[in-house]
Image: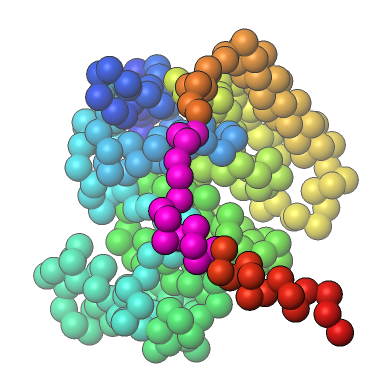
């Protein structure tokens, strides 16, 4: 039995008369401790799919199951890390994580809470910044704090919704390595959303493409047959990395071309709207006439 499953899920938005079907016939099976990346274009419904997994949205049809149990509302068994760090600005790094821990583990004693929180702050290498507020942190440090908060809840599934997309290249690479290091040490099931092919091949065991929306669905999947740990410094010389990168990129471009071909005949006529004829009020016309008389003599004069 798969650990995490999406079974024939559909989801759309809007009233019946003008409804948009975002996701259609979504089927996904993830093994326990597997690292799966879902890759697709912007606007294809990737974040909507992540919200379904997290329980932030319910499907119109189908089920999301974790360890055989149907899941509805959000819960600490599915920890999600968003694109935005989502830290409370008036709390320090320690206090943000502590608040989450106390809400999930209300019976944990004070000393245990402090040790638990510091364990995850140390894990993401933020110990010197434990008492800093979010505005005192860089973007990368904020995402480290967000990662520590999510991991501190001990979720069975870690959901990563493009959490590194807003970071600069060097910080993004650093956090990719940190996530992989933590995953290697503390195995758990991970589903990551990304639009970066290199990131997907570097991090995942399996990569699944999402078609163009609307009515997006999961398409071809690629297995990453590369030993771990993976060294980013040698990836460009790794034949499997280059093969996967080329095949996935070509497949995504094919999806894009196919989508454009399907939509090229769509023509939305614009309404034939003409501007209304109107006259300026007499007071306005008089003012414009007087103003013209005042300024005209000075134009071009020495």
x, y percent for residue 79: 34, 53
Residue visible at 65% across and 19% down in the picture: 260
Compared to 16, does 176 lie above or below? below
Can residue 231 be spotted in the picture? yes
Q: Nearer the viewer, residue 58 or 98?
A: 58
Q: Residue at x 27, y 76 (%)?
A: 98
Left or right: 111 in relation to 22: left
Q: Name the colour scheme.
A: rainbow
Q: Please say whether residue 7 is visible from this viewpoint.
A: no
Q: Is residue 154 left or right of residue 264?
A: left
- The magenta stretch spans residue 280: yes
Give yes or no for residue 68 being in the magenta stretch: no
Q: Quadrant of residue 121?
A: bottom left
Residue at x 51%, y 81% (from the top left corner): 137
x and y, in percent, of residue 96 in the image:
32, 75
Tell me if residue 54 comes above or below residue 301 in the rendering. Answer: above
Foreground of the two, 266 or 154: 266
The answer to whether residue 144 is above or below residue 226 is below
Q: Residue 223's image quarter?
A: top right
Say which quadrant the C terminus sits in: bottom right
Numbered-mark total: 0
Left or right position of 182 against 113: right
For the N terminus, give its image quadrant. Answer: top left
Looking at the picture, how far across and down is residue 10, in whole percent? 34, 22
Q: In the rendering, at what x and y percent does residue 78 appear?
A: 32, 48
**Quadrant of the image occupied by residue 15:** top left
At horizontal 37% and vertical 52% (from top left) the residue drawn is 80
Which of 124 and 145 lies nearest the eye of the viewer? 145
Magenta stretch: give its range.
Answer: 275-288
């Amino acid at each position: 039995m798969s650990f995490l499953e999406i079974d024939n899920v559909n989801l759309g938005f809007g009233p019946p008369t003008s409804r948009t079907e975002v996701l259609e016939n979504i089927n996904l099976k993830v093994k326990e401790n597997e690292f799966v990346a879902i890759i697709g274009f912007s606007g294809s419904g990737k974040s909507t799919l992540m919200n379904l997994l997290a329980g932030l949205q319910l499907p119109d049809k189908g089920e999301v199951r974790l360890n055989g149990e149907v899941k509805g509302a959000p819960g600490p068994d599915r920890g999600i890390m968003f694109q935005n760090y989502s830290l409370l600005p008036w709390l320090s790094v320690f206090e943000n994580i502590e608040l989450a821990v106390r809400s999930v583990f209300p019976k944990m004693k004070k000393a245990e809470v402090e040790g638990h929180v510091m364990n995850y702050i140390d894990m993401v290498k933020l110990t010197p910044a434990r008492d800093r507020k979010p505005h005192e942190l860089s973007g990368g440090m904020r995402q480290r704090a967000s990662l520590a908060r999510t991991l501190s809840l001990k979720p069975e599934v870690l959901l990563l919704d493009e959490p590194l997309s807003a970071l600069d290249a060097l910080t993004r690479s650093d956090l990719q390595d940190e996530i992989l290091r933590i995953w290697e040490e503390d195995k758990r099931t991970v589903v990551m959303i990304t639009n970066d092919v290199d990131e997907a091949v570097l991090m995942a065991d399996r990569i699944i493409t999402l078609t163009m929306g609307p009515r997006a669905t999961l398409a071809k999947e690629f297995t990453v047959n590369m030993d771990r740990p993976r060294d980013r410094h040698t990836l460009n010389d790794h034949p499997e990395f280059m093969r996967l990168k080329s095949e996935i990129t070509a497949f995504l471009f094919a999806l894009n071309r196919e989508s454009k071909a399907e939509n090229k005949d769509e023509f939305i006529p614009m309404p034939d709207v003409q501007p209304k004829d109107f006259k300026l009020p007499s007071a306005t016309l008089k003012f414009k006439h007087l103003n013209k008389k005042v300024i005209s003599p000075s134009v071009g004069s020495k």
